[in-house]
């Protein structure tokens, strides 16, 4: 069964850090671009970051660049998102997702997206930044 399971979310004070993990099962993520996306309360899905299948190339939304770091360990079939200097604007449900195509990046930032645009996605993990 193909599955992505996020973990690591929680409540953190402004300025704090969290590390999200996304464990994949049922297939290897090593052949796919992987993504982190988020949905803030009352808002649409927002692309946050993505990483090339081999881990060599990464991209970030302007809102998180310099604060978030995406990484992956293909030997552990796991994707990560290190989040530092968190603000209330980062409060959201965070989802990991894989590209629908092998070795291609088909999800482009700046365009409206839905979870159904991805090949698979997890149930999400809640991140709440509040004092």
Image (cartoon, helix red, strand yellow):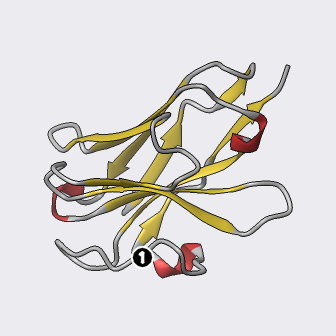
Q: Report the quarter where the N terminus lies.
A: bottom left
Can the viewer see residue 28? no
Q: Is 118 placed left or right of 24 in the picture?
A: right
Q: Depth check: give the residue in front, 26 or 12.
A: 12
- Residue 26 horizontal/vertical position (percent): 29, 58
Q: Is 87 placed left or right of 4 in the picture?
A: right
Q: Which residue is mark 1?
A: 108
Residue under the image location 74 percent in, 43 percent down = 89
User: In this rendering, is residue 96 above or below 121?
Assistant: above
Q: Depth check: give the residue in front, 79 or 107.
A: 107
- Residue 45 horizontal/vertical position (percent): 65, 67
Can the viewer see residue 124? yes
- Residue 8 horizontal/vertical position (percent): 55, 30
Residue under the image location 19 percent in, 48 percent down = 55
Quarter of the image holding residue 21?
top left
Q: Is 127 placed left or right of 100 in the picture?
A: right
Quarter of the image holding residue 106?
bottom left
User: In this rendering, is residue 25 above or below 32?
Assistant: above
Quarter of the image holding residue 64?
top right
In terms of secondary structure, where does tag 1 sit? loop
Residue under the image location 47 percent in, 44 percent down = 65
Q: Report the quarter where the C terminus lies.
A: top right
Q: Is 64 placed left or right of 126 in the picture?
A: left
- Residue 24 horizontal/vertical position (percent): 34, 50
Residue under the image location 23 percent in, 65 percent down = 32
């Amino acid at each position: 069964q193909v599955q992505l399971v996020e973990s690591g979310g929680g409540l953190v004070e402004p300025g704090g850090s969290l590390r999200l993990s996304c464990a994949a099962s049922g297939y290897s993520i090593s052949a796919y671009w992987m993504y982190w996306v988020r949905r803030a309360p009352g808002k649409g899905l927002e692309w946050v970051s993505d990483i090339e299948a081999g881990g060599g190339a990464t991209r970030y939304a302007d809102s998180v660049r310099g604060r978030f770091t995406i990484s992956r360990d293909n030997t552990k079939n796991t994707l990560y998102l290190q989040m530092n200097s968190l603000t209330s604007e980062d409060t959201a449900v965070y989802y990991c997702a894989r590209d629908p195509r092998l070795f291609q990046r088909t999800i482009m930032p700046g365009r409206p997206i839905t979870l159904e645009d991805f090949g698979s996605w997890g149930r999400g993990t809640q991140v709440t930044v509040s004092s």
